[in-house]
Amino acid sequence: MFLDEIGEIPLELQSKLLRVLQEKCYERVGEERTRRADVRIIAATNRDLEKEVAAGRFREDLYYRLNIVPVKVVPQRNRKEDISLLATHLVDVAVKELGCRRPRLTPAGIDALLAYDWPGNVRELRNVIERACITAQGGALEFDLPVSSSSIDVNFFGSKPDHEAKPEFLTDAEFRRRERENVFIVLQKTGWKSKALMVPLSFWG
């Protein structure tokens, strides 16, 4: 039995779950008959249960009853090498479930997915893929994703460290730097295919 978001269970229900795990028995709602349960439990949570126990929001005995073989899954932003394979698989799933025409997953689309931090992990990736499949109508997939601050190379733009004093007015060099940064963000959000921005090579120098 898979119990997702185990850290969200209210305290009053945690004691009942503990009894099921320890005694392997339970009663259905509105029924007096005691039934036995012979199941293996897999529980998942995005909370730090040790901190939840310390704060009194999660029972310590239930925590130790569940914490037999802990498996820590790193966030998606630390597994960027999986995104291409996951995206390809999720496109297949979306096409089958939605009954839509198969869209094209382009290198530019993969780059857009790699540039995002995915705070919602695989669930967010699946939602983004499904939305893109619906709007693509069999064409190239385009992803409307927020620009992650980590995806912008501050050294590329010549940004100054935070401890340096900021000028009261913008010099020509500072103005051009900010303009380049804005163009870069727009290009990144449009998958580097924007026709609205005709930027000469000298602009980046």
Image (cartoon, rainbow, N blue to C red):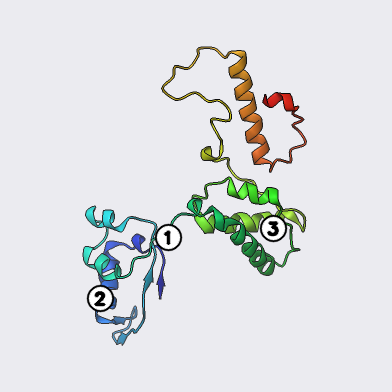
Q: Where is 8 relative to 177, above or below? A: below
CB contact under 8 Å: marks 3 and 2: no
The nearer-to-camera label among 3 and 2 is: 3
Q: Residue 15 versus residue 75: which sits nearer the camera?
A: 75
Instruction: Report which quarter residue 89 is drawn in.
Output: bottom right
Looking at the picture, how far across and down is residue 52, in whole percent? 28, 55
Image position, residue 188 (x, y; %): 65, 39
Give the x, y percent position of residue 10.
31, 62
Residue at screen point 64% across, 33% down: 184
Q: In the image, 88: left or right of 22?
A: right
Is label 1 in a helix, a strand or a loop? Answer: loop
Give me the disc on residue 73.
Answer: 1
Q: Which mark is residue 133?
A: 3
Which corner quadrant of the image does residue 136 belong to?
bottom right
Point 73% across, 64% down: residue: 100
SS type, badge 2: helix
Visible residue check, residue 142 = no
Residue 19: mark: 2
